[in-house]
Amino acid sequence: MKHKIELRYWKECPSWPIAIERLSEIISELKAQGYEIELILYEVKTDEEAEKLRFPGSPTILVDGKDIDEDGAIQNPVGLTCRVYNINGKILPVPPLEFIRERILSILKS
């Protein structure tokens, strides 16, 4: 089964290139483990589009349509903005590599 990992981003946010680097590393690992993964980069360009997608900011990572941090997505405002992640009490612009890896694997195995 082919899985889709989608990075939704707003180009004005400086955090999304870091997310791409981390995702690329994780996707290489997953492919080596036999997973079929397609990486989709989706630029959110307008406020209307952000509202329609319920875009909680950049970067947002979806695995087969599911946000890797659903609780955090709910807490972020919808719109063209930079997203923040609250990981173990730390506010971060991009989740740590291990957090992304664990969440992706959890969704893939569910």
Image (tube, rainbow, N blue to C red):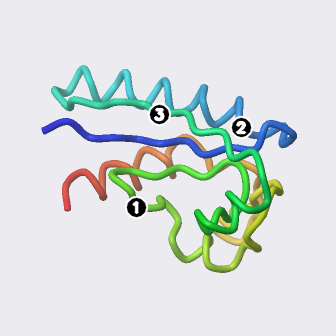
Inspect the image, locate mark 3, and give the three-letter code of the amino acid beneath it. Ile
Tell me the number on the disc at residue 23. none
The quarter in which the N terminus is drawn is top left
Instruction: Give the crowd class for mark 1: few <14, some 14-19, many >=20 residues within 10 Å.
Output: some
Judging by the rendered image, the residue that carries numbered circle 3 is 40
Q: Quadrant of residue 90?
A: bottom right
Q: Quadrant of residue 110?
A: bottom left
- Residue shown at 77%/64% (left/top)? 79
Provide the secondary structure element on which disc 3 rests: strand
Q: CA distance from mark 3 to mark 1?
A: 14 Å
Q: CA distance from mark 3 to mark 2?
A: 13 Å
Which is nearer the eye, 74 or 34? Answer: 74
Which is nearer the eye, 81 or 19? Answer: 81
Work out whether 22 lies above or below 103: above
Q: Point out residue 43 in the picture as x, y percentages from the top left corner.
A: 66, 39
Judging by the rendered image, the residue that carries numbered circle 2 is 16
- Residue shown at 87%/40% (left/top)? 12
Inspect the image, locate mark 2, and give the three-letter code of the amino acid beneath it. Trp
Judging by the rendered image, the residue that carries numbered circle 1 is 66
Q: Are marks 3 and 1 in contact (CB under 8 Å)?
A: no
Q: Point out residue 13 in the picture as x, y percentages from the top left corner.
A: 84, 43
- Residue shown at 20%/27% (left/top)? 33
Provide the secondary structure element on which disc 1 rests: strand
Q: CA distance from mark 2 to mark 1?
A: 18 Å
Mark nearer the N terminus (2 vs 1): 2
Inspect the image, locate mark 1, and give the three-letter code of the amino acid beneath it. Lys
Work out whether 93 lies above or below 23: below
Q: Point out residue 102 in the picture as x, y percentages from the top left corner.
A: 39, 51
Q: Is residue 76 left or right of residue 4?
A: right
Instruction: Give the crowd class for mark 2: few <14, some 14-19, many >=20 residues within 10 Å.
Output: many
Q: In this rendering, which labeled residue sits more in front, label 3 or label 2? A: 3
